[in-house]
Amino acid sequence: MTTRALARVVVVAGATAVALVVPVRARQDARPSFRTATEAVSVDVSVQRDGRPVANLTAADFELRDNGVVQAITDLSYEKMPIDVTIAFDVSLSVTDTVLTQLRRAVDDVRARLRPGDRIKLMTFNMRVSRVLDFTDRLADTKGAFDRVTPAGSTALLDTVAVALTSAAPVDRRQLIIALGDGQDTSSVTSEGALREVARRTTGTVVFVLPSVMTRALPLMSPMAPATSARGSVTIADGVVSTGPVQIVPAVFRTIAAETGGLVVPAIGDAISSTLTRTFDNFRSTYVLHYSPAGVPASGFHELQVRVTRRGNYDVRARRGYQN
Amino acid sequence: MRSLALTNACALAALAVASAGARAPMQTPPVFRGGTEVVSVDVTVRSNGQAVGGLHAGDFVVRDNNVVQQVEAVDATAMPLDVTILADASGGSSGAWSNGTSAARTHTLVERNVDTIAAMLRPEDRLRVLAVDTYASLVLPLQPAHQPVALRSLTSQGLSSAYDGLIAAMLAPVEPGRRHLIVAWTKAVDTISAADAEQVRDVARQSDAVVHVVQRDFAPSDGPNPLYREVRRTWRPFMRDDPSLLTDVASLSGGTFHGPGAFGDVSAADAFKPIFDEFRRGYVLRYSPRGVSRGGWHEIQVTIPRLPTAVIHARRGYAGAAAVPAPSSSGRGAAASPPMRGLAETFDRADVPAMRATLRSTPNLRSVIHAYADEGAMWAAAPKHEAMFVLELARAGVLSADAGTRDEALMVLGRQHDLVRQPLGADAFECAWYEAEAAVLASRALAIQGIDATTSAIARCPDASGLVLARAVATDALWSTANARAAAERAGRKPIASPADVLARYDEAISKQESAAEAGVRSAWLDYRIGNYADAIARLDAADRQPADRVVRFFGQFVRGQVQQARGENEAAEAAYRGALVSWPGAQSARVSLMTLLLTRGERDEAERLAEDVQAAPDSQIDPWWIYWQGAYRGFDGLMATLAELAR
């Protein structure tokens, strides 16, 4: 089994839990409560073989360990739970018009793949994190939502992801956050460490899509940190400069993506759209494993390990764990 | 006469050249703005050889072009004075016309006289000394009269730029509520000035100062003088032969000419005392001209009907608006190209939003700025107005996404940086202009340019705390930012070696009261970024926690939250973030920081609310943190307002 990343934990929690504690199949409120007496954990698990999703697996085909202790999987679902997809769209000055056009098309393509019951939310970010459209299943509302975007300002990508993850998430829906950015973060106040803590306490799966133009910009990031700086430094992006403790290197995105069971997707030119839709399709083709933690202390960080016990070479992605 | 609307003219530019010794030929004669709305006239009254006090407005009759005006009179006794001593140090240590005067001897002589004069002034009075030799130079910038006098060394190179010196002294700006008295202690010989005699007269007509001329060695009317002949033979191309000039200057400005021997042994101090006594006991008459056209020469006559035999000294007149060669009331010339003319008209109307909108929508801003650079000054008669226009133009260019436009803007800005220099030393306008320039450069965090501009400006305005802070911020940006460091490398500049260098700059700003709070916070943020959390907290503790500037207050609380969170002091960090949100409600940076902190601590509900608040914030919601590195730029509009006030 190779391990890539993409998965999701939907979780459960006890009354004291800080974390992602959800009654399985809870009501479909817009702002659900995570506090329940029932402790159950839901884990999104993506399984692929030769680059294609693998279907028809049963609970018996999985081994799930919570802090090293094998757990009994009480329920399994596949492609059944509705999806809430959040698309966060970089509108900083460093994003070119060409890239903007590609990104708009990609959003349209994702929208076209939503099923009844799925919802979409649109955000933009430069130094400002904005919600353009709140979760809606009326797909027509999304049309032209980004048409009047004019690139300006610096980039607060990590802040955006932190806000998107922290936003209230109904427990019976799967959360996919797609951040389309240029790979630079020039004005976030959220550090990598802080975002990792947020990721551990929330349920969303984060996918970073970095178009080719953006990907080439990544090497600009590393020299930003002065050699003597323990906290990183700052960078300028077209007149607006970061004030944050910049520790933004590509590894940050990989770390956060892996923490949430997501991934970093480099997209090249017109392939942005196909990359994004493929990512979305893969997310939909995901198993959700449910279990009630046993044999492990309820509190603290729970490291998760998931594997497919069937013979063969599978790519299995699941989030690394959750904080309770 | 002093016109409140009248300011010194573009001759300053020529004087800057002259006093700096560049000796560039004067391309155009000085021109003046005449948009006079209130006319002030310094008047002295003597009767039976004694100064007359106790007069009131009703005692005076003032005629402006023969039309009686309604005046108010101010007893000038209490008004503080700015006194300029123009000390003629011309003449080399050898040579017939110098009488063997050495530079050292002249220096001692001038210094002794200045000390004596300073002792006659009141604490609220101020004194400056301008020396005339081959170059006119400021050897004592304007300073409180009772401050110890430390003259810069005088030179005696043999020639005399007396005309340039006179013009430089007369064009020194006079602040409202003060009077300017010039005592020109001169040999009355000029051999190399850039200005000619007519220009000196023009300036005397317009000057805000009253000029008393004390001739040192001989009267021009005494006929050929051995010294004069020597000069003629050697320097004929530059020789000025206008024996009535000095008496005209004194008379036109409302002062008097004192020939050799008028005060016995005419040391400057001896000459000064009676002049000062009379001037101190004078009056300032003010009126708004009525019944006369604004343009042209306005002859002023002052009489006191109940004292028909009194000797009254007042300036002879002033030039009204129509005397200005420029057609605009703002002093703008007519030569500008159509795009520039449109911008200039908008600027003249003080319609800043419209001007900025025009600049933003200009399809080729680069060519517009280039055209301005080519066409040159549009407000030749109003250099301060011009200097402010350049700031707006440069601001738009610097903010442009096009590198070529930015380069053009920086070129224009750099040129104006030199032109704005006042020949007699930096005044409030010049220093404020430099601060506005630093703000423009900060708008794009142009670190190298910011450091260069502020360093040059600080040499002129060492007390300007805004400049010291701006330099520290630019130095920080150069050390901290990849783009700035790359720019430094391209320019072959040494990078900032260590954060200690940056902190030293911040410490300079901390030593100045006005910038201490912000510099303290910014230095703490730097300490935080390099992991010196304890030092960061110490700096924050030392800084004013409740500065008047709301932005600085926000910075301080937000930075404190960041540092304390890094130290694991989460409760204190939470309090700091909440404090920041009180200082600046809705600031995204504080909301996001508080959100992640609360989520980590298990306070999910409030964290979710904050996430919602962040996403739903209206576009009008601004976070000061977004412009942290733009430093002084947030004060740009305020600085422009200050400049407008100072230029008025």
Image: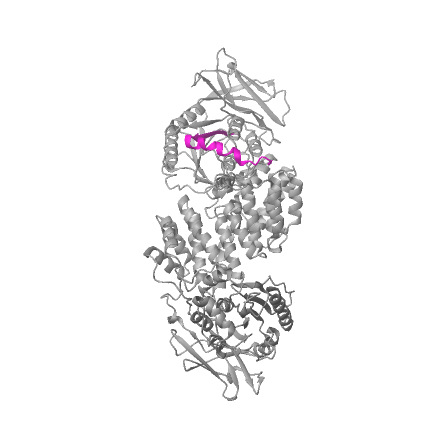
Q: Is residue B466 visible?
A: yes
Q: Is residue B426 left or right of residue A123?
A: right
- A246 or A53, which lies in front? A246
| Badge count | 0
- A96 or B407, which lies in front? B407
**In this rendering, is residue B91 above or below A35?**
below
Residue A21 image point, x, y percent: 56, 29
Q: Is residue B202 left or right of residue B478?
A: left
**In this rendering, is residue A308 above or below B72?**
above
- What is the span of residues highlighted in magenta in the rendered image? A203-229
**In this rendering, is residue B352 above or below B442?**
below
Residue B80 image point, x, y percent: 58, 71
State which quarter of the image contains the C terminus of chain A: top right
Residue B210 image point, x, y percent: 52, 74
- B503 or A51, which lies in front? B503
Q: Is residue A134 visible?
A: no
Residue B557 image point, x, y percent: 60, 46
Q: Quadrant of residue B268?
A: bottom right
**In this rendering, is residue B312 above or below B88?**
below
Residue at 41%, 41% in the rendered image: A151
Q: Is residue B506 left or right of residue B438?
A: right
* Outermost left residue: B338
- A130 or B4, which lies in front? B4
Q: Quadrant of residue A80?
A: top left
> Was residue A209 drawn as part of the magenta stretch in this picture?
yes
> Was residue A222 drawn as part of the magenta stretch in this picture?
yes
* Outermost top residue: A311
